[in-house]
Image: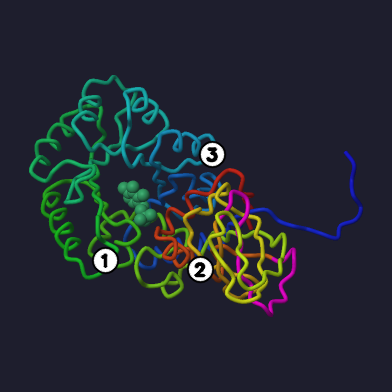
Amino acid sequence: MTKNKFQGMQLKAATATVNTRALQNNLQQIKQIAPNSKVLAVVKANGYGHGLLQVAEQLDAANAFGVARIEEALTLRAGGIVKPILLLEGFYCAADLAMAVTNNIHTVVHNIEQLQVLEQSELDMPAQVWMKIDTGMNRLGVRAEDVSEFVARLEACPNVAKPLRFISHFCCADELDNDFTVKQIACFDEVTRDLDGERSLAASAGILSWPDSHYQWVRPGIVLYGVSPIPDSAESLGLQPVMTLSASLIAIKEVKQGESVGYGAQWTAERDTRIAVVAIGYGDGYPRMAPNGTPVLVNGRKVHTVGRVSMDMLTVDLGPDATDKVGDTAILWGEGLPAEEVAEHIGTIAYELVTKLTSRVVMQYV
Ligand SMILES: *Cc1c(COP(=O)(O)O)cnc(C)c1O
């Protein structure tokens, strides 16, 4: 391999820097907000795009982990994670149930089909079951009126470890004045009141806004990553962004008034200005739908995207007097520019932004 001794230029392609101290800080913050609850840290979808195993390894202070797919749970086990892991949607087939049991992977049971598999399986050990109750979201779970009969069958099933645990999920907990959440808490309370076993209702928004929903287990996902799911800013809640997505400015162009920039000539300069090309695009997971005006941080100041996002690049208007140079760093979200704010401009949620980065993005753990 030839090596070029001249090192005059150091450009950086899309890079997600993961601040592990911020991750640990956010977990501690959650523990202060829900001091009497154990924490099931949700690391599904590759740790919300931050790296499944890398995130779990930093969360020593969690009591258990939550994932959506058995493959995710097995990856954690193969990586040396020994704490309990919960399959939040339960197992998808009998083989997965057996696999879960042998690997100390707990399972949600939310429907009659899963219950039948439990009743008909021959397992080495009883399964650790979290029965899911539908308190109004109408997605997963046993309806309130069917809970007693379902519990009776789980209680009678030798393949199910006792005591059971009970879980439900909010649909509107991010809306602080929506009494749907009050009704869901009341429903959960009522149907589980006389049942023996630990209970879990709150995900991030519930943890932050609905203390009555904390019970024995809270299930933080997005707050761990320093993103606020409610109108209050992450910063005001003591949360620090864990992911900072950045890339270099790889070109700076003088653009004259009346000239357009990018595919489709979708944006036209209203004055002479300087445009920077940033080395990130939808091939990295930066949304192509980001409209003109989406904020980007360059040298500590907020500038805005102009023109269409390309596969490998996007363009921002630096302004006519800008002194930014090729090689300077643009921050797409993270430190100094909350992903929530960027998501708002794009018409999505920060959950989707951080989760959808592609494998091309360089992951850097600090
Ligand atoms: C994803 C998920 C969570 C975490 O949700 P956040 O809003 O990210 O905190 C909690 N519980 C269940 C059942 C989930 O599927």
Residue under label 3: 80
Q: Which residue is mark 1?
A: 175
Contact flag, marks 2 and 3 (Cβ < 8 Å): no
Q: Position of residue 238 (x, y in %)?
A: 45, 72
**Quarter-wise, where is residue 38 in the image?**
bottom left
Q: Nearer the viewer, mark 1 or mark 3?
A: 1
Observer-nearest of 318 and 76: 318
The answer to whether residue 327 is magenta is yes
Local packing at callout 1 (Cα closer than 10 Å; few below 14, some 14-19, many 20+) is some
CB under 8 Å between callouts 1 and 3?
no
The magenta stretch spans which residues?
309-328
Q: Position of residue 79 (x, y in %)?
A: 55, 38
Q: Is residue 120 above or below residue 46?
A: above
Answer with the quarter of the image where residue 319 lies: bottom right
Q: How is the image coloured?
A: rainbow
Q: Helix or strand or loop: what does disc 1 sit on?
A: loop
Type of amino acid at the residue the image marks with label 3: Gly
